[in-house]
Structures are given as structure tokens and as C-alpha cells.
Image: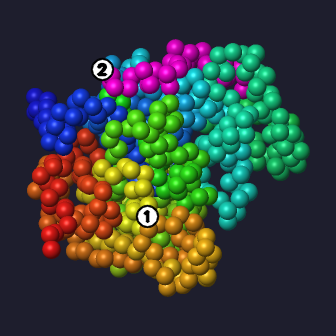
Amino acid sequence: MRKELKEKKLIESFRLFLWDWFGEKFSKAFKVIAISCLQFGDTGKGKFIHLLTWLWAHIVARSTGGDNAGHTFYHKGREIVLHLLPCGMPFDNKGVVNIIGSGVAFYPKAAVDEIKMLLSLGLTCDNLKIALNAKLLLPHHILLDRLGEMGAGKEKIGSTGKGIQPCYTDFIARKGLVLNDVLNPEIFRKKLRASMRSVQAMLSNHGPSGKKVVKEIMSHPHLEDGLYYSEDGTLNEEAIIAKYIEYGEYLRKYIFDTDEFLRGKLGKANILLEGAQGYLLSIDHGTYPYVTSSDCSPAGLAKGAGLRETDIDLSFGIIKGFYETRVGCGPFPTEMGGKTSASWCNNGATKEMEDAAYINATVNDQNEIRQGVAIRRKGGEYGATTKRPRRTGWLDLVLLRHALDSGANNIILTKLDILTGVKEIKVCYAYRYEGPDYNYGAKVLKSGEIILKGIMDPEVLDYCVPLYTTFPGWNKSIKKAKYVLDLPDNLVRILKYIFEEADVRAKPRIISVGPGPEETIFVGVNDLRLFSPEKK
Ligand code: GDP
Ligand code: IMO
Ligand code: MG
């Protein structure tokens, strides 16, 4: 009974929030909402896709990336992590349609495993629809991704090893396959052979040690424990064909022209676009080449679902409250502990190793690396996909100003509860460039120059020293806060600073103080006054 009351209250406060904000306009005209991340991923997209599906959406679409993502949410108190299926799946039995769009790099095994996992939890998947032209991710994509990373040395990206880059590369090279191909065995066989010709030739030229490495990679459970490996060191095409046709049979009832379906629903149903990764990892807008291979911006989400960017009526952008994380390689100017932290996180450290090595580290440690580890441990910042420690750093407004160019300026702040008890909170408002002279278009960037808006070139970011404003933190738990007025003054002061400094177009709309759906504060229009610049 108490639980039902809580749920009713949450639904009520969301309705009030929308009404307060848009009045009638929302119910009549606002029909497509996008939720994307404005940092390096893992900001809590899963929580908010699940929550907004519960409260609002009829259709949810995942439209970029693949099972490199890891989206976590709590459904009826149970933690669920999805990599490929949209986070609206638990509402399938309420008639919500979940879509995997044409922009997705689709690994059939990952989808089938997740469908089976959801069914085993007593959930349904009856309304799932998967794009017939989703990019088909094949075993050799995973192999090439892992081989590439092993041989990359310093140029390593730190990918998730899920085959994302080679899958999209094949698509761009016009030799990729799409999901619908698995439903037509002869066409599938023909296309697969042609598509794998060069990789098979490369594999057959490997010496014994190269073959051993290939065998090891192909023996991974994610690659069906060696099913696709031939003892001559190449891949067994017949085994791939047979398994993919089997997956095709399992998935047949879900395969659909989702682009057409979604366009037909515009203006008629509430559509939620689920972002994956984050703007700073976008192939088009991120810290290239340290990025993923899809466009994680709202425009990318719309395109990958067969829609246009202008179809999006409301765009939420998520950031972590006053800190951020990055998994894998690439520049991260505000990282606590800088390059030492990066190398620790990227060279095989595990949560267990950190628990042992940093048992006494605290969130107020004077040593930055130890402080970073303590915040990571408190925030549970270990990859939902790869379990790697997420590199942890202070909130970076220079990067945020760049990310706000995406137009996702209705901000959701998550994980504010994690910084409770941190005595001093630092916010980076600018960088000082301290590298060699660097030609940047017509301009020469010189040491000492102040940078206010993120330049996405790692050659620049690697030499940027963050300049911070420091604020006193707060001590009182905020986990039970329901309204902005329940938040400590010191926290509100930082929020106000961020929204004055970052971009006046951006507004805090939702504040998350815990992983559960009810641990959410909707910021009313009147509350916004608290964050507006003071009149002089
Ligand atoms: P995503 O990839 O953006 O969906 O995020 P992940 O699921 O990879 O990581 C976010 C983590 O933070 C998950 O474990 C969530 O359950 C958790 N989370 C989300 N919002 C909050 C919050 O406000 N507070 C806390 N403590 N955890 C949160
Ligand atoms: P969600 O959706 C955080 C990172 C990888 C690597 C780079 C390229 O859960 O926020 P890839 O395997 O895509 O070729 O790896 O991108 N990366 C993510 N980091 N969250 C994610 O997804 C990520 N997906 C990819 O760590 O640095
Ligand atoms: Mg994640």
C-alpha cells in the first residue's frame, strides 16, 4: 500500500512538472523526447529511460552503438543491466513498444541472451521490434576489435572489445550485412563470404603464435566458446552461417521495418529516444580518435531511429553531479590523479585490487589519486560492460560548454548523493594550455592561453591544465530529498554557479539523488529562480 502511494506520488509529481513547464503544450505537441549523455557515458541514462517509460513513453528506441553500452536501472527494487535492449523493456507487458533501430550495431547473441534473461525474470518481450536494417555484428568484428587493440600499443583506444568499430567500418566500406540477411540463408552465405574474404586471407597468413592468439580470443564465451574457430587458424564460415540462421529463426518475429513504424507514430505516440555512450565519445563531436564509432548526439539518435533531429521536441542531457568518469583511453583534463590514475585504470586494475590497495582512502584524502579512488568506490564507478574502473575527475565546464552545442540543454544531474561528505568540491571553469606552439587553423595556440570551450583535439587537451573554483561541500544526506528546497544551500550554490558559468541556455530540470526511480527531484519552473543569475 505504501509502495503504491509512493508510485502514485511520483507519477503525480512528473505530471505536475510537465504541466508546470509546458502547460497544455506538452500533452498536445511534445511527443518525442531524447535523453543523451553530455559527458563520457555512464551518467545514468538507464535510470531515466526506465523512469520516463514508466511515467510517459509509449515507444522507446535504442538507435546507436551496440552492446558496448551498459545501462542500469532498478525495476521493482531489482537491479537490471541491459547492453543492447532498450531500458523500457520492463513495461513491455503494459503495451510499451521497445525498438532497436537501424543505427545499431546488432550482435544477435547479445540480444537473444538479454531476451532470455528478461523472460527468466518473468517479464515479457512481446512488443520488441528490431530493425531489419540494423548493422549485423559478426564474430570477426569482435576478433578484429580485440586484435586491433592488442597491437595498438600507445594508440590503444581502450574499446569494450565488442566489435563495434569493425562492424561500423564494414558498413561505411559498403561490405557490411544487415540483420534481415540472416533470414535469407543463400543471400546470407554469399554476402558473408564476400565480406569475410580479406579477414580470412589475413588469418591464414598468421604464424603459429598469431594463430594461438586468435584461438584464445575466439574461445571467449561471448564468441560461443570457440564455435567459430577452425583449427587452420581461420574462422569457420559454415559454423557462423548455421548459428546466425538459428538466431534469425529465434528473432524472426521481432524483425521489422522500425524506421517506417516510428515515422508513422510521430505525433500519435510518446516516443523516447535512448542515448548510448556520451557526446564526448561521439564519432562526430568527441575527443576523436578516442571515441566510439557512432554519433551519440541527439541528432545521431534521431537518425539511427529513422527520424530527423527536428522531430525531437524535448532534449534532456545528463551529467553526473559535480564529477565525471571516463572508461578507456583518451584525454581527461580533470582526472583526479591525472596520468597515474589513467594508467592504473587502463592496465588491468579491478575493483578487488582497488579494495585491497586503497582500503583506507577517503573522499577527503589529500592525495588526489586516493581521493579519486575513494569517490570511484563510493559511486560504484566500475564499468557495467567491462567491469573496468572508471577514471574519475571533477566536473569540467569547458567540456560541458562544448557538449551543450548538441542542444540537449534540459539538464538531468545524477549521483549528487555520492559527493555528500566531500569537504571541498572543485569545478573546472577553464583550462590553461601549457603545451608547445600548436597550429589550430589560422591561429597558433601558445602556452599560457586560457581556453573556455572544449577543443576536442587530444593534442590540445593533453596539455590543458584545469583551473578550478572551489566550493565547500555538504554533510547532510540528500537521499530522501524530494524537492529542490530539501537540498543543502552549499549544493544549490554550486548548481547556481554551474548554470551561470556553463551556458545560460541550459537549465537544471531533474536532480537524481540515488539509483532508484523514486530518488528523483523534478525541478519546478519556480525553483529555477534559485539557479538564475542574480540581478545586479
Ligand atoms: P548509463 O550507461 O548512462 O545508463 O549509466 P550506467 O548504468 O553505466 O552507470 C550509472 C550507475 O549509477 C548505475 O549503477 C546506476 O544505478 C547508478 N545511478 C544512477 N543515478 C544515480 C544516482 O543519482 N545516485 C546513485 N548513487 N547512483 C545512481
Ligand atoms: P554507456 O551507454 C562509457 C568507450 C570505451 C572506449 C571507447 C570506444 O553505458 O554510457 P567501443 O567499444 O565503443 O569501440 O569503445 O568508448 N565506451 C563507453 N564508455 N560508457 C559507454 O556506454 C561506452 N561505450 C563505449 O570504453 O573508451
Ligand atoms: Mg553505462
Is the CB–ligand 2 distance for label 1 below 8 Å? no
Q: Position of residue 334 (x, y in %)?
A: 43, 70
Q: Name the secondary structure under disc 2.
A: helix
Say if 164 sits above or below 377 in the image: above
Residue kind at label 1, given as amino acid type: Leu
Mark before the other along the chain sequence, 2 or 1: 2
Q: Where does the image place residue 143, in percent across and percent down from the top left?
A: 70, 42
Q: Residue 530: horizontal and vertical position, in percent?
A: 15, 61
State the residue in front, 117 or 159.
159
Membership of 166 in magenta stretch: no
Instruction: Locate residue 37, reporting x and y percent.
Output: 41, 50
**Part of the protein shown in magenta:** 240-269
Residue at left offset 42%, top offset 21%: 264
Vertical comparison of 223 with 282: above or below: above
Side (left or right) of 99 relative to 172: left
The numbered mark at residue 230 is: none
Residue drawn at 42 percent across, 72 percent down: 452
Name the residue that disc number 2 marks: 94
Q: Is residue 268 magenta?
A: yes
Q: Nearer the viewer, residue 74 or 310?
A: 310
The circle drawn on residue 399 is: 1
At x 79%, y 22%, the residue is 190
Q: Amino acid at mark 2?
A: Lys
